[in-house]
Image: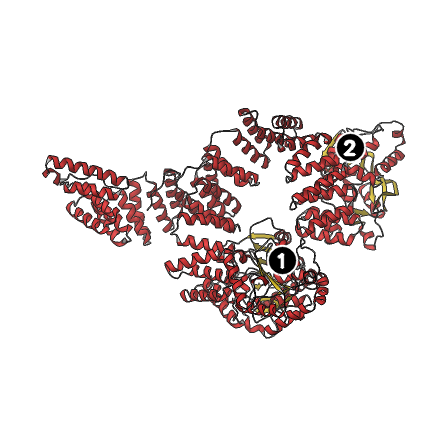
Amino acid sequence: MTGDATGGAVHPGAEAASAIAAQEAEGHATLGLALLRGGHPAEALVSLRGAVAFGDRRPGTLLNLALAEDMAGDAARAHTMLRELAVAMPGWDEPPLRLGESLRRTGRLADAEAEYERALERNPQRPEALLSLAALLMLRQEAARAQMLLLRCCSRAPDRPDAWDALGLSLMMTGDVPAAESAFAEAQRLAPQHIDIAVRRAEAAAMAGAAAEELARLEVASAEDPANVALLSARGLLLGKLGRRDEAVEVLEAAVALAPEEMVPTVALANALTVTSRAKQAAEVLKRAVELAPRDSNLRNNYAATLVRVYRYGEAQEILEGLLAEQGPQLNVLCNLTNALVSMGLQQEGVARAQEAVRFAPQAHLAWRSLGNAMAYHPAVTGETLLEAYRGVGRTLPRAPSPPGPQPFANTPDPERRLRLGLLSPTLKTHPVGWLTIAGFETLDPDAFEIVCLGQPEANDPIERRFRALASAWHVVDTDAPEALATRIRELGIDILVELSGFGDRGLIAACAHRPAPVQVKWVGMQNHSTGLAEMDWMITDRWETPEGFERFYQEKLLRMPDGYVCYSPPPYAPDVVTLPALSRGQVTFGCFNNTAKITPVVIATWARVLQAVPGSRLVLKAHQFGEAATCARFHSAFAAQGIAPGRVELRAGSPHRQLLSQYNEIDMVLDPFPYSGGLTTCEALWMGVPTVSVPGETFASRHSASHMSNAGLQDWVVADLDAYVARAVAAASDLPGLATLRAGLREQVRTSPLCDAPRFGRNLGTALRHTWRAWCAEQAG
Amino acid sequence: MQLAPTSLPVGPDPAQLTRRVQDMIAAGRVHAARPLMAALRRLAPPSPELHDMEARLLLREGRIPEALAELDAGLAMDGGAVELLISRADARMQAQDVLGAAADASDAVILAPRHPRAKAVLGVVLLEMNRPEDAVPCLREAVAAEPRHAPCVRAYATALERCGEHDAAAQVLADGIRAIPGDPTLRTAAIMVAMRARDFAGAADIAEAARRDGVADAQVFGLKGHALSSLGRHGEATAAYAEALKLAPEDPYVRHLVAAAGLRPQSTRAPAPYLETVFDGYAQRFESHLIGLHYRVPGLLRAALLELRPDVGDGAALGPVLDLGCGTGLMGVVLSDLKLGPITGIDVSDGMLREAAQKEIYGDLVHGELETFLANDRTDWPVILAADVFCYFGVLDEVMKLCHARLAPGGLLLFTVEEMPQPSEEDVAKGWRLGRQGRFSHHADYILRVAAEAGFALRVMRREGLRTEAGADVAGMVVALERVRHDG
């Protein structure tokens, strides 16, 4: 914006100039102004200086010269000129206003504020000064004062949408949401294409509890003006808030297709795609958003987090390390980087970043969560150190004030009545949680337990349909804030809350810190160790996961099942088991289809010992991470350092589930990783006729395979230390007929074992849950 | 504070948006295409292409009259637009305007003789017009051009099967499965072809291959269970039903099958969607299937009727007659030489009713559940027939009462039931049992009890072999009841 030479006060210096000089000066001044308006400040500067050299001392010319200096890069000179001009023209509001604008741009907000005040002293109704000063006041949270200025601004310049928009913002800050919505409505009337205004109006309506009404209005408006991106963006936002997530994606897709350069719908689309588990598409959209706003660090962090979800760890690492280098430590960035590093198999580096996060923000549960999640993979982890990390989460999770009154729960403490179970997880579907728990819930006695699912929105998923079929009610809670979720669970009168998501991505366990149910039980779903949460009463486990004496590693009371702690539902599409591949191939093939986070340097060294002890053998590793060339190169080099040629180790990227299962037909035996063992992966290998050599440690995660193998009757594959691990693998590889016989009967053995015996598991689960309830009732009575 | 931009920063390109919407429609993302389509129609001038796109969206949304209006508008702009003609043929088919569809499809083929979709739609229209012989060459060409278009492959197989070329139909589907191994609909179609040909072992093999290939859905497992059950391999059938239940736990058809296999508490009658699914699948070959099973039921009911009303055999008129669960109209065929009528048939399967309509015997054919029909009907029927229907009911109290209420005084209810083999004490007490094939069998004492309670007098009750299955007779009873108590 430029000053207008003809609109200011009379310029006294011009009278003294000669007619020729005045003519020259006039020409330069006019050209300078045109150049300035045209966005060519350097050229404008030459002309305007020429005008002054020819004696032009008109205030307009001097003002424009100052603006040109500022725009051409010499802010200090510009400020001096504007101050001189302000002194010379004490009644003119333009110099202090322009000085304020320049100071604001250079970040000198307090000085800018003073100049705006000065401009308003000279012209109390100047809209630009009112608006700019109000904006600065809002930055300082002085919303009430800002509001007064903005009300003046709106009355003086009622046709300015930015004034009404700012007024709406100030009203939002003071909590007057209905008035804010009215202000945004006026702004939107004046600027119907303005995306930010439409979105803010929608947000205000949602806050006022009128999301559905605003959506209805927007739909009518959209029908009349279907190419209006602002309306589409606001609709998308409200659809998301109302839980209609697929529709939100559809509407926002249209908005982005119509206005691909606009940030608001682009970022909103990425968010909508993320909450609908379409991370791959979200990553594409976020990539575009980052291209549009490359300096937006939040956006880059979100992009990196999404890249991690789609297994593009290397790219994520690069972005996150770049952010740290540019801006120093930030909690979210450190936590995302931890996740990326551990996922790539860089456990030590990951834990170091998590420790940095804890040092940076020791009161942030997110930092402790990152530390616990990373440590579970670290070769040196112990039961106690992991418990300590999760206790850190437990300590720092926010808690709502206790509800008033002596009886915190309305649940009737009758030990034998039918109980309402709440299953809390956003992964009640095709997911390890689904495969390992659904059969147990299906076989719970319906007369003894009612099941309420607290999960994700409906999707076309076969295991989710099984959950839906057994649930008396289904509540979509996966984007609820923890405290609101806890209130909801309490209102549902849940007797026993079974937490099935843990501290994983989009885990809902934080709600448990608010103690929403009388009995809270942890089972599957990032169940890598104790939750460390004082409010978690019980953990479902078994004698292999937590032998006698392991109680000290757990915050919770241990609820040991008589068999294994899970019941596996094999997929109907699993290919048939084939004969031992070593017999036809003439070489033993070891395999591990666990993700690379579990493969530590110690694991690689141990596997190398096995390969060296079994001449001609090879190892097939399969994980999403091996889709990245850099990760493959790093792993090959790690094996080479242990004397294993690259030809003996095959690295395969991820594939659809059925293909993954079929690839067990090429594997003779699985080498379990440690200290984070295979869980569902071990069950799947068993179902495909492939046993797993496993060495359990102290943490829960280190003992999954030990539990599943023992539960299927293969305790002799569970060993005590690394020497025994190598010896067991070598012994099995030396007895191929024995291995072939085991393989031929293994599916049937597993099918008839407690690992897959759903009715038996369901009975035991019912007994265990009843035990927790009776204990609570006894406490109430005592 | 940024100032508001008052216009879009970059004007959207209608051509690009058009491609985007087309991609969405092709991917079946109808809802996703809607908002963009609305914008596109505002930004771009009307064109045949836009009318076609709008119509295709409307068709996917089931808004057929609106789709037809769009297509009419598009064709008014360009009468020779082949894509629009094809779309309108499709729309007219959905609007039951077969002749109109035939005209459009023919025009499309004349304008673009090598256009595979034109050939395909003409083939489907001809199939609908019951001209499978003419449909075959069209669909053959269409499949040759687009061997990965599953609906086309299915239609081609149907046409061949209706021409009696069972092996060729099976081969087309086998080729289709090779071309599109991930499409479960072709697996289902192939299983049905085998089952209609009574090749249960072949059907089970196709289902098993689908399982191994990872494309078996609940329907495939359900049909596998059917096939195995027909082969007497009940244990394997039960396992198949259990898998079906895992994949579609909410599906009433699957739940019924599972109940029949004894995996869940039994329901008291087969759900209407189950019957509809089973019989719509079987409709085309139902008669030959049942005749192949030595189906005697219509003849047995005719004999019982003539035994009670010999005058009808001598040419006396009797009617109207209600045929409950009329299926493809076999009962009507068996009675067609008598002066009975008009006959009203009722069935839950549209496919069956279409077959029945072609016999031109029935005065009226009603699509619906028989209980609903009986509860709302106000006719006093002298004769109600229920041939092989009550085997889909466990509890008969209610349906007996409804029949009683709808019979004229002295009116006859004639029906068959399957007899319970080796009943336990519990079975006798309950009176009915759900069998592995999804049908119910009944005990004679139970029939007598509910008949008496409803106000009937027993006129005929005879043990008969109803048909053979897996080489053994299915034992049943022919029952005739007369309404003697008139308080219903």
Judging by the rendered image, the residue that carries numbered circle 2 is B380
> Looking at the image, can residue A93 be seen?
no
In the image: residue A88, left or right of residue A112 = left
Q: Is residue A126 above or below residue A466?
A: above
Quarter-of-image position of residue B134:
top right
Q: Label 2: chain? A: B
SS for dot 1: helix
Q: Is residue A60 above or below residue B262?
A: above
Q: Residue at x 86, y 35 (%)?
A: B302
Which of these two is toward me, A169 or B277?
B277
Q: Residue at x 68, y 38 (%)?
A: B154
Q: Residue at x 41, y 67 (%)?
A: A359
Badge 1 vs badge 2, beta-carbon distance below 8 Å? no
SS for dot 2: loop
Q: Is residue A406 above or below residue B186?
A: below
- Its colouring scheme is secondary structure
Tell me the amino acid under the disc marked 1.
Trp
Q: Label 1: chain? A: A
* Image quarter hosting the C terminus of chain B: top right
Q: CA distance from mark 1 to mark 2?
A: 57 Å
Label 1: how many Cα within 10 Å (few below 14, some 14–19, many 20+): many
Q: Position of residue A395 (x, y in %)?
A: 47, 67
Give the number of marks.
2
In the image: residue A360, left or right of residue A729 = left
Tell me the amino acid under the disc marked 2.
Asp
In the image: residue B81, left or right of residue B329 = left
Judging by the rendered image, the residue that carries numbered circle 1 is A435
Q: Position of residue B7 (x, y in %)?
A: 38, 38
Q: Kindly identify which numbered label has been placed on residue A221.
A: none
